[in-house]
Image (tube, helix red, strand yellow):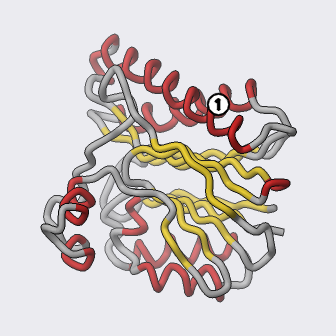
Amino acid sequence: MKAKAISSVGKVRKINEDFFGIYEKEHPIYMVADGMGGHKAGAVASKDTVSYVSQHLQKHLAPESTAKEVEAVLYQSVIEANREIFAKSQKLEECSGMGTTLTVAVPVQREEKICFAHIGDSRAYVVEKNRFYQVTKDHSLVQELIKNGDITEEEAKKHPKRNVITRALGTEDEVLPDVFSVDFTFETDHYLLLCTDGLTNAVEIEEIQKIIQETEDIEAACNALIDKANERGGKDNITVLILQGS
């Protein structure tokens, strides 16, 4: 496996409140987070969350951990990170109201699975030879409207409240993350994409798939996706992380 990630402040924002993590020691860990809050507080939330979760996972995961064991550790890592971020937001005035999305991926190669923990509207996609599909479900207002049949997925792309999320890490004293595993064949033409909504709100899904599958290598693909989002206005921070099977 190999992974690359790039984060851009975009063309409008002055501060990059996105953060990502790539840890490839005993047990590989990949994550993206999109912070929110007052002056610089979102950047604090996303960076601290990635740090808390990575430390917990590296402490409690072993190379021989099964997918079920990874899921349990992932869940606890998010619960504890939420507790830390929420406590900090209550203690420090400059961090009041801060929170973050989080999408974490932990491969378990011998079981041909990837385990996830997810909260908010940052996303994970699997890119295969003939398939490109989203494995996370947004915790967002428009996703609820789609689920209830009030709007279509096409209408959701332009909905005025498409950036309103219904769950985030650190905004309340308790959090409920989605924790699950998906099958993944670790081959060179199979990819995992983690990204913040600065990418998916600016670039069509079909374009994202085409860039990943047709670009020479994953670092170039990350750059191409960032460039495309910035060409479309770069209205938000943009973070792209691509993992390639091998």
Which x, y percent locates residue 96? 27, 23
Identify which residue is drawn at 64% across, 84% down: 213
Left or right relative to 114: residue 10: left
Q: How many marks?
A: 1
Q: Closest to the observer: 42 or 66? A: 66
As drawn, the residue found furthest toward the top would be 91
- Image quadrant where residue 186 sits: bottom right
Left or right relative to 127: residue 111: right
Which x, y percent locates residue 141? 21, 54
Q: Residues within 10 Å of mark 1 (few under 14, many from 20)?
A: many
Q: Amino acid at mark 1?
A: Val
Identify which residue is drawn at 35% across, 32% down: 41
Identify which residue is drawn at 25% across, 73% down: 157
Quadrant containing the C terminus is: bottom right
Which x, y percent locates residue 64? 86, 38
Quadrant containing the N terminus is: bottom right
Identify which residue is drawn at 23% across, 66% down: 146
32 relative to 242, above or below:
above
- Image quadrant where residue 35 sits: top left
Dot 1: element: helix
Q: Which residue is mark 1?
A: 73
246 relative to 49, above or below:
below
- Image quadrant where residue 148 sits: bottom left
Q: Closest to the observer: 132 or 205? A: 132
